[in-house]
Image: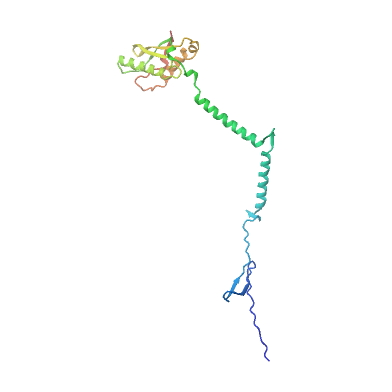
Amino acid sequence: MEEAVELKILPDVSDNNNVSSEQTTGVNPGNGAHESSTLLSAIQVNGNNGDPNEVDGVVVDSSDKTSKLHRELQSLKEDLSEVVVWKFRLWMVILFVIVAILLGIVISIIVCAVEVDADENYDKSSFVVGRFFKGNFTLSNSTLEQESLMNTLNQQLTDVYSASPALERYFSNSSINGFKDTTAQFELQFLMPLEHEEVLRFPLSLKMVKNILLQHFYDQDSGGPLFVIPTSLRMEAY
């Protein structure tokens, strides 16, 4: 009597321990056909789920860093919410100080922009008191005719005092009265208000008027045709 031998097919086993498969066979009641399905176990990929990471040989726990940051933010929030004066919290006081500083800066800018300098607001028609100076200076050389030379020098005097911020408002006129050899004689006229004590002490003092002209002579081009020797300047009030 022959023994029946039953052969049984064993399922394949994958070498990957993280993946398992199961073969199932069933009958589809709709059309009687058989289908096979493979069930795969979920694969968990370890990205950055709070597990420690190694950076340059140092183990860094991202969850600890997040927790520490959260604690610091919470502590800062509590500090800012602390009542400092009466019902005012710390963040309110800080905000008030910042707003006050900005407001002060804006007000200062506006005031400076619209402020009118009282010294710049004057009526030149009220300058009726005369102030006179005379003197002389020597040219190093000149090739111009005497009349042309006198006109040119007089224009220089006018330009010097008309461009002076301190003396422009007081300056009236200048003149070259004579020319001998290379030395020119000149006169200057200024006008002052009736109350001119302060004006005489500073803007229209002899020292101030002379130094402005002297500085102009020092700033000249030494090679120019009308070069005036600075040390030759003489001036007096009369």
45 left or right, relative to 148: right
Query: Residue at the spot x=59%, y=31% of the render?
Result: 101
Q: Tell me where residue 186 appears, x and y as whole percent.
A: 38, 12
Q: Tell me where residue 118 appears, x and y as whole percent.
A: 50, 18
Q: Quadrant of residue 142?
A: top left
- Residue at the limit of the structure toward the top, as seen here: 238
As rendered, which of 66 and 95 lies closer to the eye? Answer: 95
The quadrant the C terminus occupies is: top left
Q: Tell me where residue 33 appears, x and y as whole percent.
A: 57, 76
As rendered, which of 111 and 171 lies closer to the eye? Answer: 111
74 left or right, relative to 190: right
Query: Residue at the spot x=56%, y=29% of the render?
Result: 105
Residue 42, relative to residue 61: is it above or below?
Answer: below
- Residue at the limit of the structure toward the bottom, as seen here: 1
Q: Tell me where residue 174 appears, x and y as whole percent.
A: 38, 13
As rendered, which of 185 and 119 lies closer to the eye? Answer: 119
120 left or right, relative to 73: left
The quadrant the N terminus occupies is: bottom right
- Residue at the limit of the structure toward the left, as seen here: 145
Colour convention of the picture: rainbow
Q: Quadrant of residue 175?
A: top left
Query: Residue at the spot x=67%, y=49% of the render?
Result: 67
Q: Quadrant of residue 10?
A: bottom right
Q: What is the number of callouts on the image?
A: 0
As rendered, which of 45 and 93 lies closer to the eye? Answer: 93
Residue 23, relative to residue 102: is it above or below?
Answer: below
